[in-house]
Image (tube, rainbow, N blue to C red):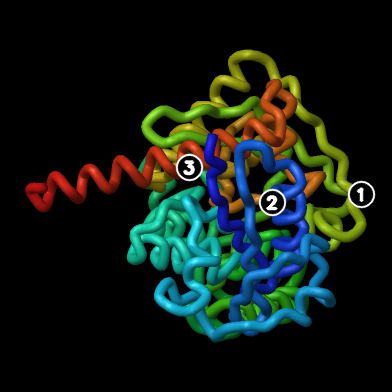
Amino acid sequence: MKKVKVGLIFGGKSAEHSVSLMSAAAIYQHLNKERYEPFLIYINRAGEWCLTGNTSFKEEELKKEKFHSFMPWSSEWAAALDADIYFPVLHGPNGEDGRIQGLFELAGKPFVGADSFSSQLAMDKVTAKMLFAQAGLEQAPYLYFTENNLEQIVELTRKKLSFPIFVKPCSMGSSVGIRKVKDDAELLAAVDLAFSYDNKIVIEKAIEMRELEISVMGNDEIMVSSPGELLPSKEFYDYEDKYLKGETQFRIPVRLGDELEARIKKTAHKAYRSLFLNGYARVDLFLEKQSNAVLINEINTIPGFTAISMFPKLWQAQGISFAELLERLIAYGFDYFNQRKENVDEGLGR
């Protein structure tokens, strides 16, 4: 049987570049080489592309490659880059926000994960929150700002919210640029930090809660995992703990009782649908401690795939190995591409 040629794209012009290298290494390691023929496309921090045979996934070594300004499908190196399907593992801006997905769609190439439109919706926290509200999902109280007007931000935050709060860039992941804030002085510094990553920020009320994550995958029919719980070693699960220290504990799966677990899974299902998602995603939820209310936090369309990442670990807890999970995601990518192609062909009367 002919192997499926998979183009694994990683790195990227993003603050989450290092995370992408770790995720890509895990995917490459677990991909069934008897069924798939992976090849590696690395994007450096300047946004330049290269085809590499270096499987160390170490940035210092990858820097030595010969780079090109873009990925042209019609050039002397196009044949080597052409895949049966592409697997983008680009966390954060320029990878998880619909840009790379739009490139594949324009080129008529199959790829793994959400389409460009849904990726944009999920990446923009403000737009996602509006759609969650439209779907009737509960959320923590929040504000958003598009200008770094500190006087207005402090005034509205005092009026509408109360400390402690979280300040976040609108379109980042992996807890990059997020601060927990307890007073006005901390608020000013956190706002400056968030605006250094994005031109739109979210300020959200910190609530007494348990932090839950659920893995979801599928197109027309979707699968929802049982929830897992994060037990952060600090006040919240920040970038350092996620990818450097690894001190946070996980409860996978977490036992919450049948009724509550059913509510949590229903919320995750509804949130996935509310952003018109396909492929796969990780849904992040809050369980309010006093009321047991289930609140939607956000959805990650290219969640971490590292050895400690919740997305694969939650499926492993339900008997789906890392290798089998990758096979399913690739199949979803082909199915979605073929479905879209049929729709386009019918629309053109072919």
- The single residue placed furthest to the front in the displayed view is 1
Secondary structure beneath dot 3 equals loop
Secondary structure beneath dot 2 equals loop
Q: Nearer the viewer, residue 263 or 222?
A: 222
> At 45% from the left edge and 79% from the top edge, which residue is drawn?
75
Query: Label 1 is placed on what type of residue?
Result: Glu
| Residues at marks 1 and 3, CA–CA distance in whole angstroms | 30 Å
Indicate left or right for 135 with 203 as reference: left
Query: Label 2 is placed on what type of residue?
Result: Gly
Q: Nearer the viewer, residue 315 or 256?
A: 315
Q: Are marks 1 and 2 in contact (CB under 8 Å)?
A: no
Specify the label residue 247 is tagged with.
Answer: 1
Secondary structure beneath dot 1 equals loop
Which quadrant, please, contains the N terminus?
A: top right
Which residue does the numbered mark 3 point to in the structure image?
Answer: 279
Q: Could you say which quadrant of the image residue 4 lies in?
A: top right
| Residues at marks 3 and 2, CA–CA distance in whole angstroms | 15 Å
Which residue does the numbered mark 2 point to in the structure image?
Answer: 304
